Every structure is written in structure tokens, then in C-alpha cells.
Image (cartoon, rainbow, N blue to C red):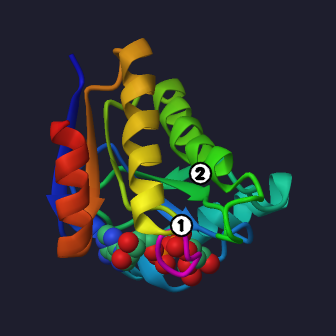
Amino acid sequence: MSKLTLLRGDITKLEVDAIVNAANSSLLGGGGVDGAIHRAGGPAILQDCQAIRARQGGCKTGEAVITGGGNLPARHVIHTVGPVWRGGQFDEAHLLANCYRNSLQLALEQGLKTLAFPCISTGVFGYPLEEAAPIAVETVREFLGGHPGIEEVVFCVFSPAEEKLYSALLNA
Ligand code: AR6
């Protein structure tokens, strides 16, 4: 059975098949976890992103693309684009669930077995954590139930508040 685990810390340090990046549709980097991943992973990740841009433009909200991991301990980075919070009436919940589902689907297609997610959209993009966390946990749980190929998913949280909330959801 696949495992769901919780860890507080820097996602760029994790030795998993892929870490997920909370990117933007340009795929050219930015602040938050995106900035941290590009800083730690080095220019190889940006090069791969630029190749994807040349092929298909950027990445739409809710979708996901994969690159190498550059200098990271993770072998790959799955870049997904979360929705910007605009009050909740603009399909944000569905788009956020798509980020988790499409990242997992891409991992499965690539034969990856372990991956780690940050709290997508809850930083710069302003999605309220209390609303985003249950979507993250439920979407991943549901996907893993139907796809035993993925062995472990780590929720990599950054703050004590995130840790508390996820811990309650995962133990429920
Ligand atoms: N490891 C794990 N989590 C982290 C790290 C890290 N090293 N650094 C930050 N977080 P954000 P978003 C957490 O803003 O809301 C960028 O500019 C952070 O505390 O990174 O999806 C992109 O280029 C928060 O819980 O992503 C986009 O333009 C979570 O990661 C935009 O921000 C997500 O916060 C995306 O905004």
C-alpha cells in the first residue's frame, strides 16, 4: 500500500524520485518554493523549462510538466501551476485538485515511485491554507487508492501551522 507522510522542512533537500514545484505558467522561475528549487537545482532545470516552453509554450493552471532535477537530490522536478486565489468562485478548488492529480499522473507515466508536494498556491498565490490542505490530502488519497504504482507521497510543509493542519487531516 502506498504511504502518505508529512515532513516539515525544505523540499529541495528531499531525496525522492520527484519533488513538485509550485511554479507559474511562464516556467521561468519566481519566488517562494519555485525560487528555492531553481537556486538549489542550478541552471539545468531552467534549461529544461525553456525546452518545454519552446515545445508547448508554458504550462496552464492545473497542468504539470516534468524536468530533470539538476543538482537536487531529487531526480526530477514536476512543475505544476496552482490557481491564484480570487475568492473561491473562479474554479480554484477544481484547478488546485488538478495540480495534484496531474502531477501524480505524470509521475506514474514516468515510472516514478516517490514524490513530495509543497503546499501549492498557499503562498504568493494566496489560497487560504485551511481550504487548500483538505483538497491536497483528499485528492492525493483518492489517486493513490486507484494507482498502487506510487509508493510514497510526502507532504512537505514549511510552517508549524501547516504541519498542525496536515497532521490532523492525515490522522483523520
Ligand atoms: N520547501 C518547501 N516549501 C516551501 C519552500 C521550500 N523551500 N519555500 C516556500 N515554501 P509559494 P504559490 C512553501 O509562494 O502560492 C512563485 O513566485 C510556502 O511557505 O512558493 O503556489 C512562483 O513563481 C508555501 O506554503 O507558491 C509563482 O509565481 C508554499 O511553499 C508563485 O510564487 C507555496 O508558496 C506561486 O505561488
Quarter of the view holding residue 149: top left
Residue at far bottom of view? 31
Query: Does the magenta segment cover residue 125?
Result: yes
Tell me which segment is drawn in magenta.
Answer: 121-127
Measured as percent of width and height from the top left, residue 150 is found at 34, 25
Residue carrying label 2: 96
Q: Quadrant of the N terminus?
A: top left
Residue at 77 percent across and 58 percent down: it is 90
In the image, residue 61 sits, relative to residue 107, either above or below, namely: below
Residue carrying label 1: 121
In the image, residue 142 sits, relative to residue 161, either above or below, namely: above
Residue type at mark 1 is Ser
In the image, residue 88 sits, relative to residue 91, either above or below, namely: below
| Circle 1/circle 2 CB separation < 8 Å | yes
Asked whether the viewer can see residue 20, the reply is no
- Left or right of 44, for residue 89: right
Measured as percent of width and height from the top left, residue 77 is found at 46, 55
Q: Is mark 1 within 8 Å of ligand 1?
A: yes
| Rendered-image quarter of ligand 1 | bottom left
**How would you classify the magenta stretch by its main secondary structure?**
loop
Q: In which quarter of the image is the C terminus?
A: top left
Q: Estimate how packed mark 1 is, as few (under 14), some (14 to 19) or many (20 or more) residues with alpha carbons within 10 Å.
A: many
Could you say which is closer to the camera, residue 163 or residue 117? 163
Residue at 17 percent across and 51 percent down: it is 167
Q: Earlier in the sequence, mark 1 or mark 2?
A: 2
Measured as percent of width and height from the top left, residue 106 is found at 55, 34
Q: Estimate how packed mark 2 is, as few (under 14), some (14 to 19) or many (20 or more) residues with alpha carbons within 10 Å.
A: many
State the separation of the CA atoms marked 1 and 2. 8 Å
Residue at 41 percent across and 82 percent down: it is 39
The secondary element bearing badge 1 is classed as: loop
- Left or right of 146, for residue 163: left
